[in-house]
Image (spheres, helix red, strand yellow):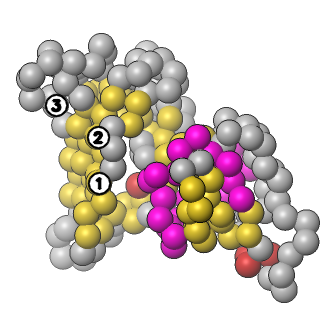
Amino acid sequence: MSVRAFKYFSIGATNTPQPLIGTALSAAVTPPTSVPPAIADALTTLPVTDSSMFLAGDWAMLDASGAAAEERVQVYIVPNGTSIKVKGMLNAHASGASVRLAVLANDIYIQPADGNSAALYVGNSSSLSTTTGAFAIKKLIQTAGGTQPQEFYVSRRAAGANPEDIGQYWIAGTLNDKYLASFWQQ
């Protein structure tokens, strides 16, 4: 059992969904051309804007949900703050493509920072819309500084409950607004 907590994440672009716990490629990447005996063992370095949310052994999803090139890869090593090495990448991905943490979690917790300028929307698709509410699970209303913000909490601890993939969660809001995200793994 362990809790994984992170730093404040910031909304990167107003009303544009981003992975709840993730980053973006800072340059385009292509799959390896020279591979060990199995393609699944080939390593690819992914240049990212922030690698702080990943640990060796984690799973990550590359690209937006539903994109033709979307794929699941395993994090082999996190050599520094702006890159990760992954195993099993088969598709090319453009600069700016999402790289989201995709591990199983029993509890998921999200809390906006107090004093944000607008509401945050939590959803289950990269097509999340702050205008129509499409794919939205919860709207977290902004609060004044020094006031307890709303929160989003999902628990799958009941006997026999299946954990959820954290990679299915997306968030949208206003540029530079912040939130905390954490989860518990059994």
* Quadrant housing the N terminus: bottom left
- Residue at the spot x=29%, y=40% of the render? 180
Which portion, as a residue range, is magenta? 45-74
Q: Is residue 162 left or right of residue 165?
A: left
Mark 2 vs mark 3, foreground winner is 2
Given the image, on which type of amino acid does mark 2 rest?
Leu
Q: Disc number at residue 180? A: 2
Is 6 positioned to the left or the right of 158 in the image?
right
Question: Residue 13: x and y, percent?
Answer: 51, 21
The quadrant of the image that shows the C terminus is bottom left
Is residue 27 at least partly visible in the picture?
Answer: yes
Q: Residues within 10 Å of mark 3 (few under 14, many from 20)?
A: some
Seen as rendered, the residue at the extreme front is 80
Identified at 19% across, 68% down, the residue is: 157
Left or right of 144 on screen, residue 182: right
User: Circle 1 sits on which residue?
Assistant: 5
Q: Main secondary structure of the magenta part?
A: loop
Quadrant of the rendered image containing residue 107: bottom left
* Amino acid at the residue labelled 3: Gln
Residue placed under numbered mark 3 in the picture: 150
